Image (cartoon, rainbow, N blue to C red):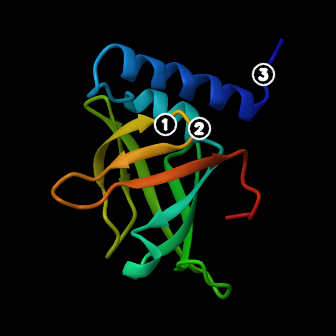
Amino acid sequence: MKLSGKVAIRSLLVACALLSTSVMADVYMKGADIAKLVIGNTIEGKYQACSAGGMDFQEHYTVDGKIRGQERPCAQAGQWQHYQGFWKIENEKFCVNLGSERTGGCFDYVANPDGTVTRLMGGGKSSVVFQIVDGNPDHL
């Protein structure tokens, strides 16, 4: 029996969350596990808190290593600004390059019990929490 995208994503997230909480607090998802979750799907979240000039974002990840994204001021209706980038797996981490002024690099990821994923930015920068949406509903 084949699982739907959402069921498969939730199953993998729950398994990773259980592993990270039962083994030790600093167990991160491997890059290949993140790739399984996001490739062919879209992630949605916020950069920073709305009160701190944050941005809503959506990014669609393709099998050929491309990212097509859009962002706009947090919690506001209006025009999205589009951007493109690339993803890869390097040293067992999932890495993103989102272009000019956007933070890129190879990051640690943690599966959260609520089905979201946290990208740990490091270097004193805030983490980004996102949810995974099946497919490419906004045609990025």
User: Label 2 vs label 3: CA separation?
Assistant: 16 Å
**Labels 3, 1: front one:** 1
Q: What residue did someone put label 3 on?
A: 3
Q: What residue did someone put label 2 on?
A: 115
Mark earlier in primary sequence (2, 3): 3
Give the amino acid at mark 1.
Answer: Asn
Establish if 100 lies above or below 36. Answer: below
Determine whether label 2 and label 1 are within 8 Å by CB: yes
The quadrant in which residue 30 appears is: top left
The N terminus, quarter of image: top right
Establish if 80 lies above or below 103. Answer: below
Give the amino acid at mark 3.
Answer: Leu
The quadrant in which residue 90 appears is: top left
Crowding at dot 3, Cα within 10 Å, few <14 / some 14-19 / many 20+, comes out as few
Residue 24 left/right relative to 34 = left
Mark earlier in primary sequence (3, 1): 3
Q: What residue did someone put label 1 on?
A: 112
Q: Secondary structure at mark 3?
A: loop
Determine whether label 2 and label 3 are within 8 Å by CB: no
Q: Which mark is residue 23?
A: none
Image coordinates of residue 103 in percent, x first then y, are 31, 64
Q: What residue is at 72 percent from the left and 54 percent from the top?
A: 136
Q: Secondary structure at mark 1?
A: loop
The C terminus, quarter of image: bottom right
User: Label 3 vs label 1: CA separation?
Assistant: 20 Å
Give the amino acid at mark 2.
Answer: Gly
Crowding at dot 2, Cα within 10 Å, few <14 / some 14-19 / many 20+, comes out as some
Relative to the observer, which residue lies in front, 86 or 72? 72
